[in-house]
Amino acid sequence: MLELDSVIHAPNRLKICAMLSAISELDFQLLKAELDVSDSVLSKHIKALESAGYLIAEKRKTSGRPTTWLKLTAAGRKAFNEHVAALKSIVGEL
Amino acid sequence: MLELDSVIHAPNRLKICAMLSAISELDFQLLKAELDVSDSVLSKHIKALESAGYLIAEKRKTSGRPTTWLKLTAAGRKAFNEHVAALKSIVGEL
DNA sequence: GCAGTAACTTTCCATGTTGGAAAGTAAGTT
DNA sequence: AACTTACTTTCCAACATGGAAAGTTACTGC
């Protein structure tokens, strides 16, 4: 039985995972703009996903301001796919 | 832009809506067994969906114990379909 | 017809989540 | 050295969720 993953189910985290599932790597500012949330809120969602082992944040100090890049881990990708499968099993084909 | 409906998004209510979307009419006891929750919890979720105008509860006093039958309203069906569409737009084809 | 039980409903309470504001930190810019 | 950017953490307030227990209403049995 596929169960919904509460770490992923929260709307904003679902969106983060979906975007990272599609695009592989995104930075903090872009994600913040997409979700339209405050810095603190995004930071906490990222932390929640990191704590679950679903994503990794990497601070790159390329020229200019430091930027935090986010990407799903293999476990995060798997968890997201399973979550989507669980959604499918609940609502039928999406 | 299709938005997630927080009344429907909660796991147990998502399941209730999905079941009622597929089966049209189910009774309290069956739903309670399917969701594996307490009476009070199911009662409150039903109330939340009713308050949103998404479902109607009908108490039938056929022979034997009274049974509460639940079904989605037209608005509930629409909201559920839109919620599923929103999920699709977020995660891609389910 | 009165006790007992089934089928909820409501209240109480404890815990967890979510979100923004504000304060804090670290590093780059001027 | 002061300012700004890019977060992070702390502090709160509000709401969500869940079970237990108590309350209702209506059958059922005797």
Image (cartoon, coloured by chain):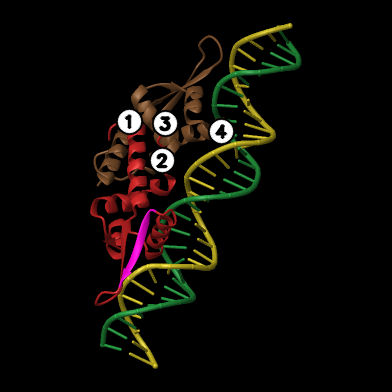
Chain colours: A red, B brown, C green, D yellow
- Earlier in the chain: of badge 4 and badge 1, it is 4
Q: Are marks 4 and 1 on the same chain?
A: yes
Q: Quadrant of the N terminus of chain A?
A: top left
Q: Residues within 10 Å of mark 1 (few under 14, many from 20)?
A: some
* Residues in magenta, as a range: A54-60
Is A59 within the magenta? yes
Q: Residues within 10 Å of mark 2 (few under 14, many from 20)?
A: some
Amino acid type shown at disc 4: Ser
Residue to which mark 4 is pinned:
B40
Query: Can you say whether B89 is above or below A72 in the image?
Result: above
Residue to which mark 3 is pinned:
B16
Q: Real-space Cα distance between discs 3 and 2?
A: 14 Å
- Earlier in the chain: of badge 3 and badge 1, it is 3
> Residue A89's x, y, as percent?
35, 32
Q: Residue at x 36, y 60 (%)?
A: A56
Q: Residues within 10 Å of mark 4 (few under 14, many from 20)?
A: few
Amino acid type shown at disc 3: Ile
> Residue D8's x, y, as percent?
43, 68
Q: Residues within 10 Å of mark 3 (few under 14, many from 20)?
A: many
Residue to which mark 2 is pinned:
A4
> Residue C16's x, y, as percent?
52, 50
Q: In this rendering, would B44 be left or right of A80?
A: right
Q: Real-space Cα distance between discs 4 and 3?
A: 15 Å
- Chain of the residue displaying label 1: B
Amino acid type shown at disc 2: Leu
Q: Are marks 3 and 1 on the same chain?
A: yes
Q: Secondary structure at mark 1?
A: helix
Q: Nearer the viewer, mark 3 or mark 1?
A: 3
Label ID, residue B77: 1
